[in-house]
Amino acid sequence: MTIRLTLRRVAAALCVLLLGGMLFAWSGLFNVAATGGHWAATDWFLHWVMRNSIRTYAMTSVGTPPDLDDRALLARGAGHYAVGCAACHGAPGEPQNPVIQQSTPFPPDFSKGMAPWSDSELFRIVQHGVRFTGMPGWIVPSRSDEIWSVVAFLRAMPELSPEAYRTLAHGEEAAHRPQGAQAGMDALAMPNGGVLSGCASCHGRDGMGRDGDAFPIIAGQSEAYLLATLKDFASGARQSGIMQPAASRVSEQQLRDLAAHYASQPRPVRPAAQAASAADEGERIAREGIPAQQVPACLSCHGADGVARNPALPRLEGQHATYLAAQLHAWRQGVRGGRSGAVMEAVANRLTPAQIEAVSKWFAEGYNP
């Protein structure tokens, strides 16, 4: 007997299949338990689709990477990885927690090595995450500088010894941090007992940072400014995929305690020889502004008198030039935020890249209030 296919019969067959699928889903017979795992064919298919998708999107949606061997970039990436990633993916000397291994699909254990992803593919994964897994996207996908820091660390991690990893991730606080398979899980709960230690892993207990210009100097900033900044990070008003998770897990009283601690630390003292090396252009911008470009004098707000009038404004003297320039560029790109975001975006967009570099260098090396 020959059955002739017609459009009506095909449509009817599709409706029956759809109805059957809906009835099966409604019955609850499909096992969604994580302990069941995937069939081998399902696991292969899903990973095949994922690899193809990441490869395709990484070709067009990833910008030019910075120097991925830069020590400061590696330190920033390692500091975030230790508290945001190691709980699921492990780290040198810190294998995955057994709890994580019961998820489906369970995340790869990076303490045993990494799959051969390219730099652009790693960027795509960190930036946007992976659907149908536990891999989240970056909180602020537009902060490519932060994402590249994680990529730099992921690229370097397979070659790190456990000791080198802990030093890179925690600095002088490594001795106070948990070790082994519990390290990542303990780090997630750390605000209950080690808030200062968590901040000091990157900023130091003295607020001077570490690894060159990896982290901004926060010592001696006003308590009002530090508290407002931490609150902005916690709420997302100031955009950072690194700082928002750290600040949002801390109580308001703990934020106040942190602000008071770092406000009490002495500001850095620069040798006179350094102060004399500042560029004249940077000093002119800071002291006089650029009237032709509608750029006000930086010192009208950030000088000693301006900060005294409004303690919620940051002090800039002695800060790393690279950090100051990065903030101005972030304002130009509209990816920084903060309470003064609208004002600073307008100012930053009126400065040329060369002017940004000059004024940043002057505040770092030449300004002594």
Image (cartoon, grey):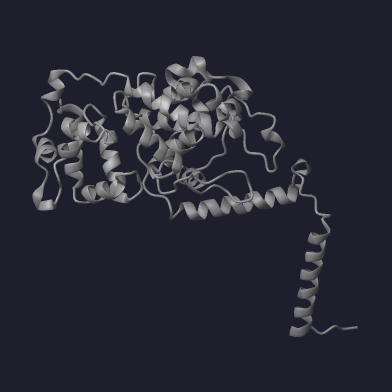
- Outermost residue to the right: 1
Spot occupied by residue 272 in the image (x, y as percentages of width and height): 13, 19
Residue 270 shows in the view: yes
Position of residue 286 relative to residue 43, above or below, is above
Residue 358 shows in the view: no
Q: Quadrant of residue 363?
A: top left
Side of 17 relative to 226 (left or right):
right
| Residue 81 or residue 193, whichever sits in front | 193
Spot occupied by residue 245 in the image (x, y as percentages of width and height): 49, 37
| Residue 214 or residue 220, whichever sits in front | 220
Spot occupied by residue 9 in the image (x, y as percentages of width and height): 79, 82
Residue at 25% across / 48% down in the picture? 343
Q: Quadrant location of the N terminus?
A: bottom right
- Outermost residue to the top: 175
Side of 90 relative to 253 (left or right):
right
Position of residue 39 relative to residue 287, above or below, is below
Spot occupied by residue 288 in the image (x, y as percentages of width and height): 9, 41
Count the labels in the image.
0
Q: Quadrant location of the C terminus?
A: top left
Residue at 72% across / 51% down in the picture? 42
Residue at 54% across / 40% down in the picture? 116
Residue at 46% across / 18% down in the picture? 173
